[in-house]
Amino acid sequence: MILPSPLSVGNGHLHIGGHDTVELAERFGTPLYVTSEDRIRENFHRFAGALRNHYQKVQVLYAAKANGNLAVFKILASMGAGADVFSAGEVALALAAGMRPELLLFNGSSKTSADLALAVEKGIRVSVDSLDELRQLDRVAGAAGKTIDIAFRVNPAINVPTHPKIATGLATSKFGIPAGEILDVYREALALEHVNPAGIHCHIGSQILAVEPFAREVEVLIDVAGDLIDIGVNLSFIDIGGGLGIPYQRETDRAPAPKEYAGAVMPVFLRGIKELGIEPELWVEPGRWLVADSTILLTRVNSVKIAHKAFANVDAGFNLLVRPTMYDSYHEVVAANRADAPAVREYSVTGPICETGDILAKDRMLPELAAGDLIAVLDAGAYGFAMSSQYNSRPRSAEVLLAGKEAALMRRAETVDDLTAAMVTPPWQE
Ligand SMILES: *Cc1c(COP(=O)(O)O)cnc(C)c1O
């Protein structure tokens, strides 16, 4: 098996960032998310560096939804990242981590008036997703006596090779304004008093393992930018979104490196802006690529059952990692306490949730397993804990952050009391 960079094997145990996973599981308990800060820093350097080799005015906006731990935000903030935020909660986290409001973009197709007011109050740019939202935002900004910089989210109608639930730039997607109607909304924005159309935004989807769709996306954006200049829009940023995928199946997936991504996207962008005679900032919104491979989910085998096939029943299920159930995603699994034992039997690694679909990994060759063994689920840093739930009334797990030789909680495990903390007894039940 090919192990991603923060992982290694020593004394028969899987290590992450130089830490023995067996010791981490004993010290902090399972299930347990473990994240390597060093790996996030490396990823950021590689991603931002690849683009900045072509053009200096690149700003990375971390897609906040991928991993919402404040400690992760702080790592990225310290490296100069802003954030693509979708909610008041993500705004609060980004600001608490020290990100500057002008490096945030408030995204989403369904914002409340409170969301719009928050953006206006904090001076956060908004990616506007409809004409209705534009008019509401203009009123909200007017009431506050302010003018707010906006972009529109363009729907480029591009098919991308990924899971349909995470393809966002299809003509039929709920996101964005069709490229054919985009001039009209900019015209309206130009005529309004309290919004200033300053950018253009697009995001075509997630876990995309080819670079061509991104190059086509940039072509569409450059075309639109040309039309926008003609009607008098002063473009200060072009935001091409995120979506670069990672090789979850390392043996077979071919995933483009950031260098390849930059090599496909940047020439189109640079040629385009040169022809248009503008030098806008290029904004990018990677989520998965920055954090996915920084993190593993450690889960303990409760029991082994040999039925029509072999099941390793573990203590984490789709309550903690929903991707396999929701998107049929593949995550590599490793027997962390016997990482160099030969794989001798096919197991399905199944969680404790009372649903048939609660399978973390299907039919994988693993060493002979027994109760008490430790399984590591790899590449769990993006859309892992972030999408967890308390389903089946299971408190969520702890998250540990590693930096060099240090290991510490970045989130404590929830308790049964946390399950009822927000519940209120109706008076007639008192
Ligand atoms: C989810 C999302 C991203 C990040 O996608 P990744 O595949 O994690 O890189 C970026 N921009 C927007 C608008 C998103 O919704």
Image (tube, helix red, strand yellow):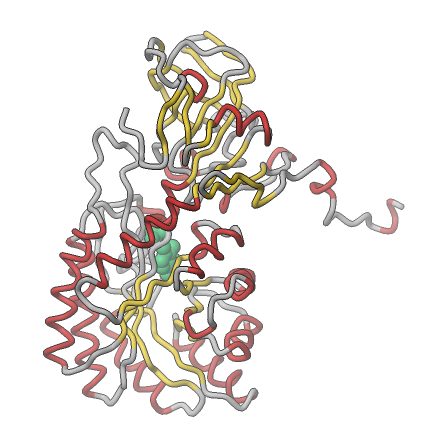
Left or right, 239 with reference to 87: left
> Is 64 placed above or below 176 here?
above
Which of the pair 241/131 is nearer the observer?
241
Query: What x and y, as percent, mark residue 65?
Result: 45, 54
At x 50%, y 16%, the residue is 373
> Is 419 placed above or below 371 here?
below
> Is 80 placed above or below 384 here?
below
Quadrant where the image shows the N terminus: top left
Which of the pair 167/297 is nearer the observer?
297
Which of the pair 300/22 is nearer the observer?
22
Left or right, 28 with reference to 365: right
Left or right, 335 with reference to 351: left
Mark yes or no: residue 174 visible.
no
> In which quadrant of the rendered view does residue 282 lie?
bottom left
Tag count: 0
Ligand 1's quadrant: bottom left
Query: What x and y, as percent, mark residue 257?
Result: 21, 47
Left or right, 35 with reference to 259: right
Mark yes or no: residue 261 visible.
yes
At x 27%, y 38%, the residue is 247
